Image (cartoon, rainbow, N blue to C red):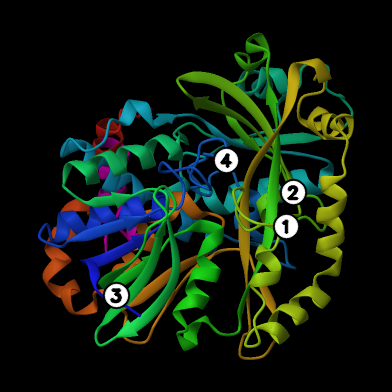
């Protein structure tokens, strides 16, 4: 093999929110680093980061009920909600710093939007009441409101209260300072910033293979626009290719890539086509997932701002696909099964037959069946006002644990080589919202020797970096005032 070709300090594979975030962090921390980015499509943010392919919630655990767990005694475990809220606040701080540096325009990708949770039935009302009691006592969630009063709820979400059954108990919580984030636009702005800093960004380039050569990675790449194949050398490689990351990680051959598999889950939304209806709802309202549904299928009725227009989405309905990317191949799932992960994947398949059955059933739902689910949120919904929209694909991680083979995990995880020369991000939710925290983890794994020197700059960029935000009320206040003002979020 010819190992002559282009060269960089760090090669980033995939032009989504993760590579964009890691790229700007590295250029702020060490401007002299030479970065190269390779993306198989013709523009950034075309897969999971695209605004039509994700919920855009700015996952902060303000409304997502699956981030809190009710214990047998009725108490509420909110540790995961706290962790996710702190992670999202890391993102807010970095974005605010980048706004001040002139790299981002906040009004084009983020805006304040109330986050609410909505439940019906005595059991779930009690759950929400317990959840509010536990969360509102914590400094991160102290502004969370709770109500069962239908007049109050009619002010919070009038569309959802029209023609609603008056016999069923209902309740909701509300946090005024939630957000709607257009992660597609944010990603595009990050890449525009990187281009201005002379980062080499190559679109229509597919990574074919990896080979370790001395202390570098030799990456064979095909330029699909010209047909040329060449080798690129890099000291460090980050694989942030969404659903494509697993197969790329497997191509590196690192031991850490063994006994890891992927399980694709699709998403389908109903999008409102009637502006008069969309303009009557101004919130992200999350309910409880159906029994047997994956966590990423928690139903929600969301106001979204896409292409400068206000719209309304309901979903997601889960779906099953053999592809790992929307632009992927039906052979993706089969090709991801290798001798070293065959038992892992098979074990997960056997244990999750009910989930697979659920996903297949979801794909087969008619539009009218989807409308019936929407009417639990919005009783007056009319089919002619809504279209079915296919969202992005997420590949959930399958791993062996110390005690069990083939465990299906709903989360994100950085998998890296022992020497830190290559790292890949696998998994899904909460994904983009916690991109800054995840990329900080990549820095720790791949640039361990530089972290001490980078610490002051990281804390300038992200004041809560390395700190326990829950125990620092002054820092919480700083984020809720100065950071929010910089991002033009107004309470």
Q: Nearer the viewer, residue 325 or 93?
A: 325
Q: Label 2, on which residue?
A: 318
Query: Residue 20's spot in the image, x, y percent?
Result: 33, 50
Q: Label 4, on which residue?
A: 55
First of labels 1, 3 by sequence position: 1
First of labels 1, 2 by sequence position: 1
Q: Nearer the viewer, residue 477 or 266?
A: 266
Q: Nearer the viewer, mark 1 or mark 3?
A: 3
Magenta stretch secondary structure, dominant? helix
The Cα atoms of the two marked residues, 4 and 3, are separated by 30 Å
Q: Which circle marks residue 294 in the picture?
A: 1
Q: Which circle marks residue 446 in the picture?
A: 3
**Mark 3 falls on what kind of element?**
helix
Q: Please identify the quadrant where the C terminus is shown.
A: top left
Residue located 24% across and 78% down the image: 448
Q: Are marks 2 and 3 in contact (CB under 8 Å)?
A: no
Q: Is residue 30 left or right of residue 291?
A: left
């Amino acid at each position: 093999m010819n190992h002559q070709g282009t060269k960089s300090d760090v090669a980033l594979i995939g032009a989504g929110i993760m590579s964009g975030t890691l790229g700007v962090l590295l250029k702020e921390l060490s401007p002299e680093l030479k970065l190269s980015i390779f993306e198989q499509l013709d523009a950034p943010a075309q897969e999971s980061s695209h605004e039509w392919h994700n919920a855009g919630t700015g996952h902060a655990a303000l409304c997502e009920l699956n981030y809190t767990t009710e214990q047998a005694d009725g108490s509420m475990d909110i540790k995961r909600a706290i962790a996710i809220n702190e992670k999202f606040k890391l993102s807010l701080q970095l974005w605010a710093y980048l706004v001040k540096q002139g790299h981002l325009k906040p009004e084009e990708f983020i805006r304040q939007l109330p986050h609410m949770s909505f439940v019906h039935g005595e059991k779930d009302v009690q759950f929400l009441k317990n959840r509010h009691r536990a969360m509102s006592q914590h400094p991160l969630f102290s502004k969370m409101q709770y109500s069962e009063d239908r007049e109050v709820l009619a002010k919070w979400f009038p569309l959802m209260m029209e023609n609603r059954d008056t016999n069923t108990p209902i309740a909701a919580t509300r946090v005024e300072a939630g957000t709607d984030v257009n992660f597609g636009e944010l990603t595009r702005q990050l890449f525009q910033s990187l281009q201005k800093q002379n980062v080499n960004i190559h679109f229509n380039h597919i990574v074919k293979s990896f080979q370790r050569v001395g202390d570098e990675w030799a990456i064979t790449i095909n330029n699909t626009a010209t047909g040329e194949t060449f080798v690129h050398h890099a000291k460090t490689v980050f694989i942030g290719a969404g659903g494509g990351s697993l197969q790329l990680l497997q191509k590196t051959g690192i031991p850490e890539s063994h006994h890891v598999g992927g399980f694709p889950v699709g998403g389908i939304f109903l999008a409102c086509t009637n502006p008069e209806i969309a303009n009557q709802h101004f919130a992200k309202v999350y309910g409880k997932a159906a029994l047997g549904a994956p966590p990423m299928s928690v139903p929600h009725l969301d106001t979204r701002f896409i292409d400068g227009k206000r719209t309304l989405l309901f979903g997601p309905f889960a779906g099953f696909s053999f592809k790992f990317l929307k632009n992927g191949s039906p052979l993706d799932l089969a090709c991801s099964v290798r001798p070293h992960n065959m038992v892992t994947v098979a074990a997960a398949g056997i244990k999750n037959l009910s989930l697979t059955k659920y996903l297949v059933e979801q794909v087969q739902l008619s539009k009218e069946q989807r409308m019936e689910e929407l009417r639990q949120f919005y009783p007056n919904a009319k089919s002619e006002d809504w279209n079915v929209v296919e969202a992005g694909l997420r590949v959930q991680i399958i791993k062996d644990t110390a005690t069990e083979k083939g465990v299906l995990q709903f989360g994100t995880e950085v998998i890296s080589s022992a020497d830190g020369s290559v790292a890949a991000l696998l998994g899904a939710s909460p994904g983009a919202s916690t991109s800054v925290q995840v990329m900080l983890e990549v820095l720790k794994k791949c640039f361990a020797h530089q972290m001490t020197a980078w610490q002051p700059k990281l804390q300038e960029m992200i004041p809560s970096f390395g700190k326990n935000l829950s125990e620092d009320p002054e820092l919480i206040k700083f984020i809720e005032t100065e950071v929010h003002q910089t991002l033009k979020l107004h309470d």
